[in-house]
Amino acid sequence: MDKVAMNFALPVSILREGDSFVAYTPALDLSTAGSTFQEAQKNFGEAVNIFFQELMEMGTLNDVLKDLGWEKQNNNFVPPVVIENSVQNFSIPVLN
């Protein structure tokens, strides 16, 4: 069977948590980390590749992507679009 490339753009947030950097995409609900920004980016790319390879090997690619909100358009899957990425302030009462 011939291999065909699946191309898509993913929204990725990279957060700093202490001395680590965490890369996360809501489109796959997938995250990974690294000790540097660049390492987090590299590890994230590897994690995405592994994620898709495993889904294809298990034969669950279509079902998992649909469950994550992806849509099939012209025989390609399109991830959900992030409408906003913002910071919101909250005040939560706590007991003393």
Image (spheres, helix red, strand yellow):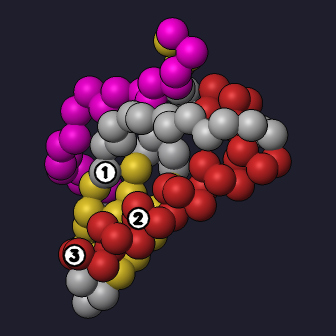
Q: Is residue 80 left or right of residue 76?
A: left
Instruction: Using the image, tell me which numbered label, if any, was put on residue 12.
Output: 1
Asked where in the image residue 95 lies, by quadrant, the reply is bottom left
Query: Which residue corresponds to mark 3?
Result: 37
The amino acid type found where label 3 is placed reads: Phe
The reply to whether callout 2 and callout 1 are in contact (CB within 8 Å) is yes
Q: Which residues are magenta?
A: 74-92
The amino acid type found where label 1 is placed reads: Val
Q: Position of residue 22 (x, y in %)?
A: 34, 70
Query: Which residue corresponds to mark 2?
Result: 44
Magenta stretch: dominant SS?
loop
Vertical position of residue 89 compared to residue 14: above or below: above
The amino acid type found where label 2 is placed reads: Phe
The reply to whether callout 3 and callout 1 are in contact (CB within 8 Å) is no
The quadrant of the image that shows the N terminus is top right
Of pointers 2 and 1, the one earlier in the residue sequence: 1
Callout 2 secondary element: helix
Between 88 and 86, the one nearer to me in the picture: 86
